[in-house]
Amino acid sequence: MFRTIRAIAAAATIAAGLATAPAFAGGSVSLSYIPSDPGQAQALQTGLGLYALAKGIKSGSIKQKGFGNAAGLLQNGQGNLGIIHQKGNGHTGTVQQNGNGNTYGLFQFGKNTQAHAVQNGHGQAGAIVQLGW
């Protein structure tokens, strides 16, 4: 679990450093995490569950701040948690969950990023953080 937390923290640190690229550079960076074993999946589900609890999210949420953003969340099953958080302009993101007990977090910041996630099955977890400039 701590290895997972350290990996996510390292990825966030790298993304923060990339955010200081010159304004004329344009582009994006995406950090995606799909757990490779049940323990890692449980750790990610717990982390996203705590985020949801703090934000008052029960099974799904789309939060957007900015202009020209588009998002969609489709859940087929029970006990799924889908989170889409977009801050900035021109983001597109979707999460589709088919099955039970799946958890996914999609976080987009800056501008003009795009991500689409599909979970088929039960008890899956995943997250993506994107930064566009």
Image: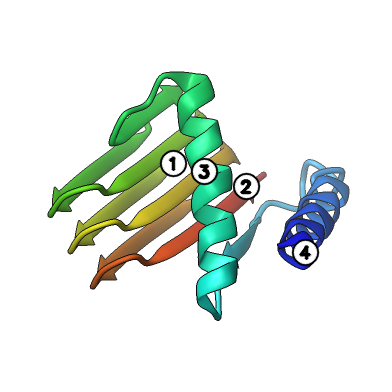
Check disc 1 and report the residue beneath it.
91
In contact (CB < 8 Å): disc 2 and disc 3: no
Q: Are marks 1 and 2 in contact (CB under 8 Å)?
A: yes
Name the disc covering residue 48, or none. Answer: 3
Q: Residue at x 84, y 58 (%)?
A: 10
Which dot marks residue 132? 2
Who's the residue at 38% across and 53% down the image?
103
Question: Furthest residue to the left?
Answer: 76
Q: At label 4, which amino acid type do we have? A: Ala
Q: How many angstroms separate mark 1 from mark 4 (CA)?
A: 25 Å
Q: Which of label 3 and label 1 is nearer to you?
A: 3
Report helix, strand or loop for mark 1: loop
> Residue tagged by mark 4?
7
- Callout 4: SS: helix
Task: Choose mark 1 or mark 4, whichever is in front.
Answer: 4
Disc on the earlier residue, 1 or 2: 1
Nearer the N terminus, badge 3 or badge 1? 3
Label 4 or label 2, whichever comes before in sequence order: 4
Image x and y of residue 62, in percent = 34, 31
Work out whether mark 2 precedes mark 3 in sequence or the reverse, and give the earlier one.
3
Badge 4 crowding class, 10 Å Cα cut-off, few under 14, some 14 to 19, many 20 or more, is few
- Kind of residue indicated by mark 1: His
Q: Position of residue 44 (x, y in %)?
A: 56, 56
Location of residue 70 (image quadrant): top left
Alpha carbon distance from label 4 to label 3: 15 Å
